[in-house]
Image (cartoon, coloured by chain):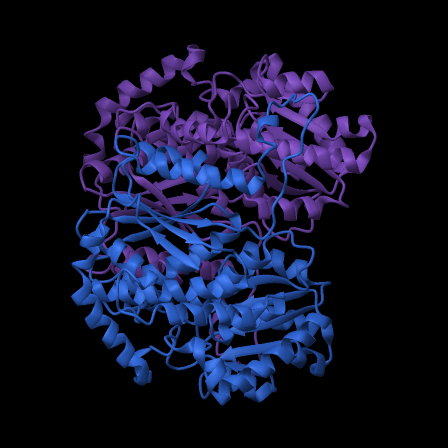
Chain colours: A blue, B purple
Amino acid sequence: MIQVDLKNAQIKDEELLKYQEQVTLIHQKLDANLIHEDEFCGWIDMPLKYERDLNYQAAWQTMNTVASRIQKEVDVLLVIGIGGSYLGARAAVDMVQGFYNKKSPVEVIYAGNTLSSTYTAQLLDYLENKEFAINVISKSGTTTEPAIAFRLFRNLLIKQKKSKEVVKNRIIVTTDSAEGILHDLAKEEGYQTFVIPNDIGGRYSVLTPVGLFPMLVSGIDVEKVLIGAQKAYQECKTDKILVNPAYKYAVSRYHLYQEKNKSIEVLATYELQLQMFCEWWKQLFGESEGKDNKALFPASVVFTTDLHSMGQFIQEGSKIFFETVISVKKPNHDVPIPELEDDEDKINYLTKYSLHDINLKACEATIAAHSGYQLGNVPNIVLQWETMDSEMFGFAAYFFMRACAMSASLLQVNPFNQPGVEVYKKNMFELLGKK
Amino acid sequence: MIQVDLKNAQIKDEELLKYQEQVTLIHQKLDANLIHEDEFCGWIDMPLKYERDLNYQAAWQTMNTVASRIQKEVDVLLVIGIGGSYLGARAAVDMVQGFYNKKSPVEVIYAGNTLSSTYTAQLLDYLENKEFAINVISKSGTTTEPAIAFRLFRNLLIKQKKSKEVVKNRIIVTTDSAEGILHDLAKEEGYQTFVIPNDIGGRYSVLTPVGLFPMLVSGIDVEKVLIGAQKAYQECKTDKILVNPAYKYAVSRYHLYQEKNKSIEVLATYELQLQMFCEWWKQLFGESEGKDNKALFPASVVFTTDLHSMGQFIQEGSKIFFETVISVKKPNHDVPIPELEDDEDKINYLTKYSLHDINLKACEATIAAHSGYQLGNVPNIVLQWETMDSEMFGFAAYFFMRACAMSASLLQVNPFNQPGVEVYKKNMFELLGKK
């Protein structure tokens, strides 16, 4: 479902194959980690667990039942979480449901991902007369942003509903299975809970209830998401760089970093709906690789809009980056260009195309402009996606997680920790006088 | 209204003063260009024109009259434009009005900034039963994205309204004063027009009708925007680096690029509402400076949300960038943290703060974490903004335009052209068979 096309990346197959030995060793290590739950490798065979594991099957049933009920009861699902606790769900909802989608059963809104008082005040005001439910997502419950948001929006729900029973039915907690402030609070209050597995870190958690429950409520066909992830799992079973698409991508980007002195990877899409997918990707790669003063800086652009802002830089600015272009063959919707009798706007020559045809031509033209020798001279890795639907989301999510684990391992950093994130938190707790 | 704080930027005043001679020369040149209309310097004294120039005053009156009428007639203003033809207005509307703002008289939606058929199809569907007006913004009318969108959404309006007169009153065209496809079409159909001045390029046009008319319809106090811009104009009259805040910022970033080998500038904000301001900033600097294989790559993050994604990289990844942090003293709204009797979520220690207090502490903590020696070691330029209101928007817009003209000139590139943007367009027109 994803073809990795290196025609415009200035990389030959022979160059990739130089890394085969390293890749094979890492592949075996990743596979072996399947049995070490403490190594955060639980995501690797996650796509199979909903078929094989009775606990997962039970959770799946409950998620579906609760999601159907919530869809009937509310206008808005408020997802409270930050980083890996919301980016995956948001990436999926934006990509599959799009914007201004009159057919979505529930509007999904995000909170607890900011300390902005202006955003929070306006959202509190907006929800005042709306029917809403809360899905709060946090492993420990101690992360400041979601903790504050949960207190504020739960307060609003209690004021609005007055009945303890109704409030109870409108709060769903996704957290640790056995301990933590949020776990204890949910138990005390009798809230519905879903489990964040111990062997999966935040940025690898999109295929757990962290991502799947909001997707279900938004109306996404989550069974198809899992089917897509299973297909990716199968395609990524081999250690052969030229056969495993995730490894082909991982090795290509590592090669451009290591051998061609590229410092930035710019992920480019031609669909506004993929912007949050790019944000999810940034966390995945930035947090997995940005260690020991190393790694590609992950940036993203949405074309063609950003061709009219970052386009000039990409074409003629400093050559410190390469592009990874996502090109989607089949869009979720297409639009014909109507004919105008008098052609007063002079675009009747476009009526033989659909809008998506034109988008694909723009993509082709841009790859040639940016990568062409003596033009942009920017390597372009092209990822050809078949579709932009729920199955594709599952496939792409797994594809990039697998690629990231390989890529970070090639860089010789731990793909699963994030020690640097604690520094500002420590400072902040000191400033706030937390005991 | 903006203080440039270099305490955490690893830059001393003496280092800045080394550039004084260069800055003075460029400053004089910029000032002299006031009289050369063909040099695209019309934006420099733009803040004064609404007071001094009768044409501008007449346009101002008409904009206000039309905006008031549109506010009464419609639910949605559809702004059709790409790059400099929409980013400024969107930056202002998001920053000042925020999200989920029940008090905004009209919802502003953007089109013609993408070739995504999925986005366009969903938006066509969404507007089908809504009262909407169109403000199409394009100098020539030949840019493909807005031309297609205008044809599609005008079609929808004609289908919806059936009356030629009603349709005529719902379309406002912002374009060239004398020629071009869009100018001719508007004249033919009798649409209301506003003028894009010949001496101002797209990315410097936010204080012309390009930006001001959508702001007016959205309910922004545009008089205050102009007052803010005038204040910035006055503060930027001096060539003295340590007195002129825009030049202080411009020279600091140039110094970090030229002398400290930084390749990326990361603009960091703590307000989700400033995200589009960052996009506007990216176009301004990326398109003005990205030439001759030079310039800082402009990127942006919104904290604290991105501390949970890009935070790890910034703290411990490769040290090829510096941060420019926007810290806002007074938010548009604030929220108290309520006390919980049983403190079951363990954050009662925060009730002595407002949410904005906590956001400011997070900012302070993060600057220390990222810039601190042996910690992040990332230079942090801090821009202290007084507020986030309409006056501040005008001030900040002018501040950054002035800084950009200086910064690009120090880099010895032309701040006002964008030759590289044409390459992909030429390819695309060939692929589409345009004659």
Residue A50, image x, y percentages:
49, 81
Image quadrant of residue B74? top right
Front residue of B196 and B58 = B196
Q: Which residue is drawn at 61% across and 87% down?
A: A190
The image shows residue B176, relative to residue B309, as above or below, that is above
Image quadrant of residue B254? top left
Horizontal arrangement in the rendering, residue B226 relative to residue B326 (left or right) = right
Residue A404, image x, y percentages:
32, 64
Q: Residue at x 30, y 56 (%)?
A: B314
Q: Can residue A150 be seen in this view?
A: no
Q: Which residue is drawn at 56% across and 26% down?
A: B138
The image shows residue A340, relative to residue B329, as above or below, that is above
Front residue of A388 and B305 = A388
Horizontal arrangement in the rendering, residue B131 relative to residue A257 (left or right) = right
Residue A349, image x, y percentages:
58, 27
The image shows residue A429, relative to residue A5, as above or below, that is below
Residue A102, image x, y percentages:
69, 55
Horizontal arrangement in the rendering, residue B103 relative to residue A225 (left or right) = right
Q: Residue at x 19, y 59 (%)?
A: A17
Residue lying furthest top? B35
Horizontal arrangement in the rendering, residue B74 relative to residue A427 (left or right) = right
Front residue of A172 and B379 = A172
Front residue of A61 and A209 = A61
